[in-house]
């Protein structure tokens, strides 16, 4: 048999519950503060950030030295990669498929490039004359096409490459963050 709670205890518990529910509701309604931007200890640039490969042969290593084993060789100059860490002359990068490793900083470029929807192999995507879904079609780009990002508004990016220059929806590119503006 359980003891019957006293009225004062019941009121205290009810008050506590109201307080807890109110606090929980406020926590859900109040936006969380933005996470502080990490800064690279070597360059002083933001981490993570996008860059591109300078060369058509870049060794991806297990660790930040030439003594570490090569785990992959990139063979596509201009490929966008995400820099996630820095150590001395080495940068930890991630590609569009999630592979990670270390490369020499001299093999990276600050030139912003975008990879057209690598997650939709075999599909094509419209490149428009202006940043509007109703704008005339300039070209159809296949998944995996790389272009130079000229600018991004947060929803559309101007992408240029060999034989094309136009606007593509930003969420169709890997190499630019959602909502990011590029000038």
Image: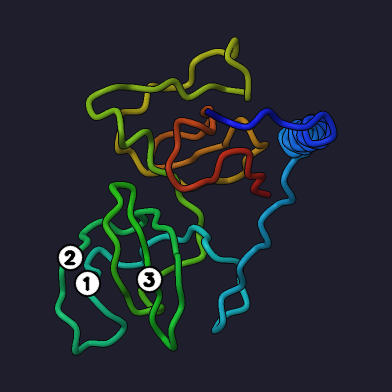
Q: Nearer the viewer, residue 84 or 128?
A: 84
Q: Is residue 3 left or right of residue 17?
A: left
Between disc 2 and disc 1, whose residue precedes?
1
Residue linked to disc 2: 73
Residue at position x 37%, y 65% from top? 93
Q: Nearer the viewer, residue 165 or 115?
A: 115
Q: Which quadrant of the view contains residue 66?
A: bottom left
Residue linked to disc 1: 59
Where does the image place residue 180, in percent across and percent down from the top left? 63, 44
What kind of element bears circle 2? strand
Q: Which quadrant of the view contains residue 42?
A: bottom right
Q: Does the CB distance between marks 2 and 1 fall below 8 Å?
A: yes
Between disc 2 and disc 3, whose residue precedes?
2
The answer to whether residue 96 shows anywhere in this view is: yes
What kind of element bears circle 3? strand
Q: Nearer the viewer, residue 27 or 114?
A: 27
Alpha carbon of mark 2 to alpha carbon of mark 1: how far? 5 Å
Crowd rating for badge 2 (residues with CA inside 10 Å; few <14, some 14–19, many 20+): few
Q: Disc number at residue 92?
A: 3
What kind of element bears circle 1? strand
Crowd rating for badge 1 (residues with CA inside 10 Å; few <14, some 14–19, many 20+): some
- Tell me if residue 169 comes above or below residue 114 in the rendering: above
Q: Is residue 71 left or right of residue 31?
A: left
Q: Nearer the viewer, residue 113 or 175?
A: 175
Alpha carbon of mark 2 to alpha carbon of mark 3: how far? 14 Å
- Tell me if residue 130 comes above or below residue 114 in the rendering: above
């Amino acid at each position: 048999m359980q003891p019957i709670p006293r009225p004062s205890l019941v009121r205290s518990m009810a008050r506590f519950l109201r307080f807890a529910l109110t606090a929980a509701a406020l926590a859900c309604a109040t936006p969380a503060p933005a996470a502080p931007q990490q800064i690279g200890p070597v360059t002083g640039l933001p981490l993570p950030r996008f860059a591109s490969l300078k060369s058509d042969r870049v060794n991806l290593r297990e660790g930040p030295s030439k003594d570490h084993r090569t785990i992959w060789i990139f063979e596509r100059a201009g490929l966008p990669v995400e820099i996630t860490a820095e150590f001395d002359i080495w940068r930890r990068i991630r590609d569009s498929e999630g592979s990670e490793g270390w490369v020499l900083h001299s093999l990276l470029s600050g030139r912003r490039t975008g990879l057209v929807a690598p997650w939709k192999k075999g599909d094509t995507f419209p490149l428009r004359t202006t940043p509007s879904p109703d704008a005339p079609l300039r070209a159809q780009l296949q998944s995996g096409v790389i272009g130079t990002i000229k600018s991004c508004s947060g929803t559309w990016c101007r992408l240029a490459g060999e034989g094309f220059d136009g606007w593509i929806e930003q969420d169709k590119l890997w190499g630019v963050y959602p909502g990011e503006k590029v000038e």
